[in-house]
């Protein structure tokens, strides 16, 4: 358990290291790690509010959310009691963890079955999620939301065709083998390959295709 006696610590960094092992922070960390996206948003909102209400506010923004530097400033000033500093530090560590989680929400957080896991697939999935075209579900799968129009399997099929190098010709797919079964399972849909061929066989090019093409065509 962390001590409230300054003399027990040689420096602010030693005190902060001790706090990172304290039950109060470890309990908060466990809650964060098991929280849904919506719950994390609530934690973020509350952490920002608590920091802005406390004595760390100016330092927090001056040091660009660098927890160690803020703690050093508050430690040196001696104006904040250790019990209050502990509470403030836990909120700062909370926000630090949430911001790092957000930064890692791109390719590194894309989880795909082995047969689908390719670097360009991770990149495309991450970009589609950034655009809110799709989202991860709690069971480790994905759900297609849509490009802003009505969500449909045709959009998803076209997107996945681009991801897995489907090449449409009159005689069928001239590109790589389309992993339909695994993709049907991953997105909880059926007959993706049929939807994909229907997209290309339509008399008119669908307007939403350009939105999906932008994922792959941007520099």
Image: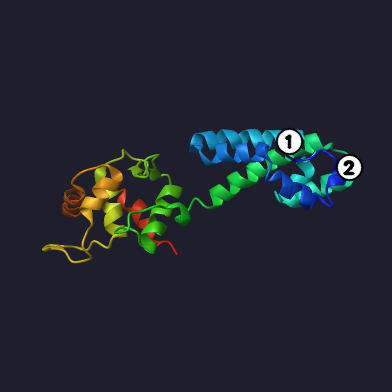
Residue in view at x 60 percent, y 47 percent = 99
| Residue 139 seen in this snapshot | yes
Q: Quadrant of residue 142?
A: top left
**Residue lying farthest to the left in this orientation:** 171
Q: Nearer the viewer, residue 38 or 167?
A: 38
Task: Identify the image's colour scheme: rainbow, by chain, secondary structure or one colour.
Answer: rainbow
Crowdedness near tag 1: few (<14), some (14–19) or many (≥20) residues, C-alpha within 10 Å: some
Q: What percent of the width, then of the height, locates residue 70?
A: 77, 48
Q: What percent of the width, then of the height, locates residue 200?
A: 19, 55
The residue beneath circle 1 is 87
The residue beneath circle 2 is 78
Residue in view at x 27 percent, y 52 percent = 158
Mark 1 or mark 2, which has the lower sequence index? 2
How far is mark 1 from mark 2, CA to CA?
Answer: 15 Å
Q: Nearer the viewer, residue 4 or 28?
A: 4
- Looking at the rendered structure, the number of numbered marks drawn on it comes to 2
Can you say which quadrant of the picture contains the N terminus? top right
Q: Nearer the viewer, residue 27 or 199?
A: 27
| Residue 61 seen in this snapshot | no
Are discs 1 and 2 less than 8 Å apart at CB?
A: no
Can you say which quadrant of the picture contains the C terminus? bottom left
Crowdedness near tag 2: few (<14), some (14–19) or many (≥20) residues, C-alpha within 10 Å: few
Residue 64 numbered mark, or none? none
Residue in view at x 55 percent, y 37 percent = 40
Q: What percent of the width, then of the height, locates residue 149?
A: 33, 40
Looking at the picture, does residue 211 appear above or below residue 46?
below
Report whether 146 appears left or right of 74: left
Label 1 sits on a secondary structure element that is helix
Report whether 106 appears left or right of 156: right
Report whether 130 appears left or right of 41: left
Report whether 25 appears left or right of 122: right
Looking at the picture, does residue 216 appear above or below residue 43?
below
């Amino acid at each position: 358990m962390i001590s409230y006696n300054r003399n027990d610590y040689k420096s602010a960094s030693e005190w902060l290291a001790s706090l990172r092992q304290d039950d109060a922070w470890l309990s908060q960390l466990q809650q964060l790690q098991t929280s849904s996206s919506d719950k994390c948003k609530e934690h973020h909102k509350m952490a920002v509010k608590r920091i802005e209400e406390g004595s760390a506010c100016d330092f927090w923004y001056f040091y660009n959310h660098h927890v160690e530097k803020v703690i050093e400033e508050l430690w040196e000033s001696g104006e904040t009691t250790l019990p209050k500093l502990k509470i403030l530090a836990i909120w700062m560590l909370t926000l630090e963890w949430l911001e790092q989680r957000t930064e890692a929400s791109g390719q590194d957080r894309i989880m795909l079955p082995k047969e689908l896991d390719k670097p360009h697939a991770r990149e495309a999935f991450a970009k589609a999620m950034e655009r809110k075209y799709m989202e991860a579900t709690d069971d480790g799968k994905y759900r297609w939301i849509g490009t802003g129009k009505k969500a449909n399997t045709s959009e998803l099929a076209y997107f996945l065709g681009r991801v897995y190098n489907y090449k449409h010709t009159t005689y069928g797919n001239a590109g790589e083998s389309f992993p339909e079964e695994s993709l049907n399972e991953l997105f909880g849909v059926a007959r993706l390959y049929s939807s994909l061929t229907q997209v290309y066989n339509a008399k008119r090019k669908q307007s939403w295709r350009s939105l999906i093409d932008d994922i792959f065509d941007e520099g």
